[in-house]
Amino acid sequence: MKSNKLVMVSLLAAALCMVAVTTVSAAPIVIKFSHVVAENTPKGQMANKFKELVEKKLPGKVEVEVFPNSQLFGDNKVLEAMMLGDVQMAAPSLSKFKKYTKSLQVFDLPFLFDDMAAVDRFQQGPAGQKLLHSVESKGLLGLGYLHNGLKQLSASSPLRVPADAKGKKFRIMSSDVLAAQFEAVGAMPLKKPFSEVFTLLQTKAIDGQENTWSNIYSKKFYEVQPYITESNHGLLDYLVITSTEFWNGLPDDIRVEVKKCLDEAIAFGNKVAAEKSVSDRQKIIDSKRSTIIELTPEQRQQWVDKMKPVWKKFEDEIGKEYVNAAIAANKK
Ligand code: SIN
């Protein structure tokens, strides 16, 4: 009887020990967050803020490893890598989802949004929220939108009217809408990864590119592009993305907390984006390396007239409901 009791006590002690060891040694969930831009950009700062928040709220349970500057994957590979489980989160530009859904192309239509407030209304409205799920059938899930801002045109010669772009080579992201947009002004678009843009510009393999103030500043494009036309002709925003397998596999309480941290990090990143669209523009002016061309209303209208017909070509594959909702978002 006494020895039975002893055995029971020893077994219980051993079981408790095992639980303790498991609890102590349970490896944290690791979220690899890969992106292509510098750390001093809206996306770079959002990713770092996300890491800080997650590791504060879920110490020992979740770790976030951020890989900036295409260190881990470039945009062309990151989504494939995500589906293989080699990376858990990323925030590619909305222009880089063509292989996964046609609907997100709505964000590339030139001269669609009047300003970033309209972009916000569209993204947070029913159509924008539905689009977060547009890649779900491919095993991916949009967790939220992050702003960078409106794009400008940079070039080796001044671009005031569309005829100035004729015959010139422009690097674009991997989007058919962006290709059509440059073809509409008689230019030659080239789809190239972000990591190659500086060298292509520096070696004059291409004449120009389109990007936001923060990307033009942080990647030093302004040092090799003597002219930047303030065209605000299109949007460069991001879809923060994960794989459905990873996301649904997270314990419920962890998933809720991680999403809260992400929402807070996105709000922070959006503030950074708004600030940088002003401060990075100013830093470029102050550098005196590049002349900023402000368009007259008549000049701007010429770009609109040439580029806007591109909408017609894509609205069926995008879905008219999305195009119409985006147009409606311009009305306050
Ligand atoms: C990015 O902002 O993530 C890159 C944009 C680009 O490829 O031009």
Image (cartoon, rainbow, N blue to C red):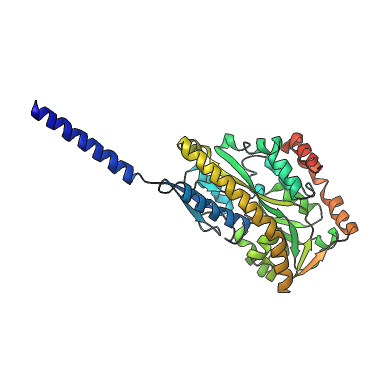
Task: Tell me if residue 119 can be seen.
Answer: yes
Give the image location of residue 69, x and y in percent.
56, 60
At x 67% / y 65%, what residue is drawn?
A: 217
Q: Is residue 12 left or right of residue 163?
A: left
Give the image location of residue 70, x and y in percent.
55, 57
Q: Which one is nearer the viewer's eye here, 170 or 224? A: 224
Location of ligand 1 given as a quarter of the image: bottom right
Residue 145, located in which quarter of the rendered image? top right
Task: Tell me if residue 91 can be seen.
Answer: no
For the view shown, which residue lies furthest in the left direction? Answer: 2
Give the quadrant of the N terminus: top left
Q: Is residue 193 left or right of residue 149?
A: left
At x 49% / y 37%, what residue is drawn?
A: 245
Give the image location of residue 198, x and y in percent.
64, 65
Give the image location of residue 98, x and y in percent.
65, 44
For the view shown, which residue lies furthest in the top direction? Answer: 1
Residue 40, located in which quarter of the rendered image? bottom right
Give the quadrant of the C terminus: top right
At x 73% / y 67%, what residue is drawn?
A: 282
Q: Which one is nearer the viewer's eye here, 272 or 136? A: 272
At x 75% / y 59%, what residue is drawn?
A: 152
Q: Which one is nearer the viewer's eye here, 167 or 231? A: 231
Q: Is residue 170 above or below residue 5?
A: below
For the view shown, which residue lies furthest in the bottom direction? Answer: 288
